[in-house]
Every structure is written in structure tokens, then in C-alpha cells.
Amino acid sequence: MGIPRSLLPITAIVAAASLGAVACAPHASQSTAEQNVPGLSPRGQQELAQVEAEIDRIEAKTLARLAAPPSNLTQQVELLGKAMMYDKQLSVNRNEACAFCHMPEAGFAGPVSELNATTAAYPGSVRTRFSNRKPQSHAYAALSPVLHYNTARGDLVGGNFWDMRATGRRLGNPAAEQAQGPPVNPVEMGLPDTACAVYRASRRPYRALFEQVWGRQAFAVSWPGNVERVCNRPGPPTAADPLPVHLSPRDRGLVSATFDQMAQSMAGFEASAAETPFTSKFDAVQAGNAKFTAQEKAGYDLFRGKGLCNNCHRDGGPGEDPLFTDFTAINIGSPANPRLPYYRESRPDPRGYVANPAGASYVDGGVGTFLANGPELSHPSAVDARWLPLAPGNSGRVQVPTLRNVDMRPYPTFVKAYGHNGYFTSLKMIVHFYNTRDTLRRCQPHDPGEGTTCWPAPETTQNLDKTELGNLGLTEAQEDDIVAFLKTLTDGYIPAKAP
């Protein structure tokens, strides 16, 4: 496996994750260890602090609206969803909001440039635990269909998450089921029980609005006396006590229903104009209110033609919104990303949790792993048993992401990570990969040509796509043209207007 670039000071993060150097305190106050990410450079820590301050600012502004909430039910749901999206209290150490991995200035993806350039994955509420993938943008994610099998295409279509495990089959909404994953994912927000999310929400300023929208029964739960202590301990729960907040059957039913409603509220916010505005230059051009530059137009022609991009990243057809994804899954042959700390999370942390028993030999099985084994680390959706035979044919495949806001960034030198594992760190790099995957030589370890004149082997060759990419025959100038077009998909070109 080739190393794409130096690990910079982030090696300290990897070491901390491996050795379990930071234990989380069982109290509500945030210690330095709970808030900081070990190994970030001073500049990275400053950037992290700025992101956290922006989360706090947005939350404060959102909570201020509770004094005079909108009268419209849809807008009330959106307000609730936004309040919870920016609420750090819904994580085990009260230090990580959902928005930490999905900030608007980064296209609702990872907002810390140094993390994108190094670890690619983001730390959880327990700061030495990292996911196995980079944060997926949830811009336009609410428009994904419920996961289903399309007989004509012979393929699964829809769902949320890279591995489609938020199917939407239970709640009828993939975005809602996606929202149920991070709160109880040990490497993300880390709560040991969904009841903890409901308990924490019941103590938040938005409780009254929640009860107005969803009913007074939402938090009418008899909480056990030890609920604070239980919910301050990071998950996962033990096999012997999978629901450590001990509730009566009635109260467990109430908690489950309220957790669903919390998720539906967050999905309501994701479906709002804040995250699905259709305000890019591309949209303005399609409406006849702007014109592409010559390079952008050439890039769009290549996107739809020789580049084959439109085969999966569809720009719409009759009756379709141009969402730049077909909601299927594919294995493009991305190399493994050795910068992921997840490879080193093979030893017990202070709570005895091992995130990655496979260690350095871990291979991301994508949709196939979900279908064969159920969701990894979090469990928003069950697997339809009728899909089990589809697991081998989906091994190594991950969801085709939308390209909307693919270049949105807070400042020009901000690094964004691309691909399910964040191996690619620029649009030029991933377009070059699509063009030359099968024509350039294989890299040697620490090869200086990696990413330009050679590529490492795919992380897995199972179900490797050999028809849509790999030998496109594009010139370097044509690669640049496609990149120029992709930059027209950034929202904000058109001033947003209320309908």
C-alpha cells in the first residue's frame, strides 16, 4: 500500500488512538482532553476551535428563535431539527454536535481542513475514536429515495450513508434513519443507548416546541435514578446489558417513538431550503439567468460525453431534479487510505472498546458488508432478508455521492477530502484518477509519483467497475475543464429566496 503523502503531526492522533491515551470523563463538564483532538497542529487546533465557535453561534441563534417560533408546522419541524443538529449535548461527552462533521461552509461535509488533509475521518465525542470513513455530505441527502431494488437496472437504489445502511424502510425516510446512527455510534457521538439521546433532549430549551409538534407524551418517561451516570459512559453497551437505561416496556416504547421523532425533525431540516437550495451557477445557467465560461461549458460537455461522469452522477432528465447522483453504488477502485486512524484502532481503549479488530488488514466491504452482516457500529435500519443474496455482488461498492457543493469551501486553500475513505484531497486528483486509473503504473511504497504518474492498487477489486472509468483518454486540459465545471455546482451563486 503506497503512502500518498506525509502524515504531518497527525501521527500523534494515530498513536493516541492506538494506545487509548485519552479517557473520557464521566461528567458533563468538558475537559481539555474531551474537547481537543490530540496531534493537531496549533493551526489545526485554532481551526477546530473556530468550527466549534461557529456551531455554538448557530445553535444560540437557533435557540433564540424559540421565543417566537413559527406558526407553520413544517417550519416548526425544521427549527427543531436545526436545534438538534447543532446540539453538542446529544453526544456522550457533550462536546460534539451532528454538525461537527457536516458544516454548511464545507458543503455540509467535514469543516476542518487539517483533518481532511490528514486523517480524512473525524474524531468522535471520545476524541481518540475515529470512523472508518470520511464524513459524507448530507446536502441534498433528504432527496434520496427509500432503498429499493430496481429490477430493470438489477441494482439497489437509494438510502443514506456510504453503505446505504440507512434504508428508510422503517420510517419511510432515509435521512431520518441516517440521523439515528451517529448518536449511538461508539466512534461518533458515542451514547450507549438511544434513550440517552431522548433524556438529553428532554432537558434542552427546545423541549416545549418538541412537545407542541409531537405531543406531550414525548418525554413523559419515568427515568431511572442512575440515568445521568449511565448516559455519561461512552458506548457501546455490553452484550449482557444492551439497553443500559433500564426502562419499563411502556417507557421504552415512548423513548423509541420520541427518538424516531427527533430523527424525523432533523430530516425535516435537511429537506429545507437551507440544505437543498438549488442556488448554484449550474442552476442559474439551466434557468437561463447565467452563462458558463468557455472552460465550464467545455467541462460540462466532457462531463456528459467523453468523461462518462453523467452515467452515474446524473444531471437530471425529464421530470428529474439534477442531483448529480443516480443513488446506486459502485466500486471505482479507490486505493486504501493509510491515513485513516481506524487502521490503528485494533487495541482496547480505556473503556475496553476495540473499534477495528481487523487492524491493518481491514478492508471496507461497503454495501456488501451491510447486506451480509447488518450495519457497522450503528444500526439505523434493518436488512431486508430478501436482499441477502445481493451481498456478494455489492462487496466493495459504496454509494455514488451527489456532486452538488463538491467544491464548497470556506476559503480557497481549504482542503477537502473525496471518496468514501478520503484518499483523494483535490478535485483534480480524483478526476485524474477517473481518467488514468488503468493506464498509469502501480505505485511502489512511498512513490513520489503517487497521484500523478502512478496509482496504488485498489483497496478491493471485488465488483470493480471497468466500464465507467479508468481509461478515459482525457488530456490534462480536459481534466481541468471538468474541474471547472464541477465548481459551478456550489450553492450560493443565486441569492436564496423564500418561496
Image (spheres, rainbow, N blue to C red):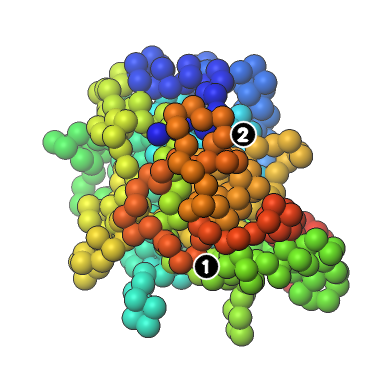
Q: Residue at x 62, y 68 (%)?
A: 306
Relative to 174, residue 5 above or below? above
Q: Residue at x 41, y 17 (%)?
A: 15
Q: Residue at x 61, y 76 (%)?
A: 316
Expressed as whole percent of the image width and height from the top left, the position of residue 141 reads 53, 60
Q: Nearer the viewer, residue 458 or 111?
A: 458
Tag shown at residue 312:
1
The amino acid pointed to by label 1 is Cys
Give the secondary structure at mark 1: loop
Which corner quadrant of the image does residue 159 belong to?
bottom left
Q: CA distance from mark 1 to mark 2?
A: 28 Å
Residue 8: in sight, yes or no? yes
Q: Nearer the viewer, residue 263 or 426?
A: 426
Q: Residue at x 45, y 41 (%)?
A: 442
Expressed as whole percent of the image width and height from the top left, the position of residue 475 reads 68, 56
**Furthest residue toward bottom:** 318
375 vs 271, left or right, is left
Tag shown at residue 62:
none
155 vs 214, left or right, is left
Residue 88: in sight, yes or no? no
Q: Which residue is mark 2?
A: 112
Q: Residues within 10 Å of mark 2 (few under 14, many from 20)?
A: many
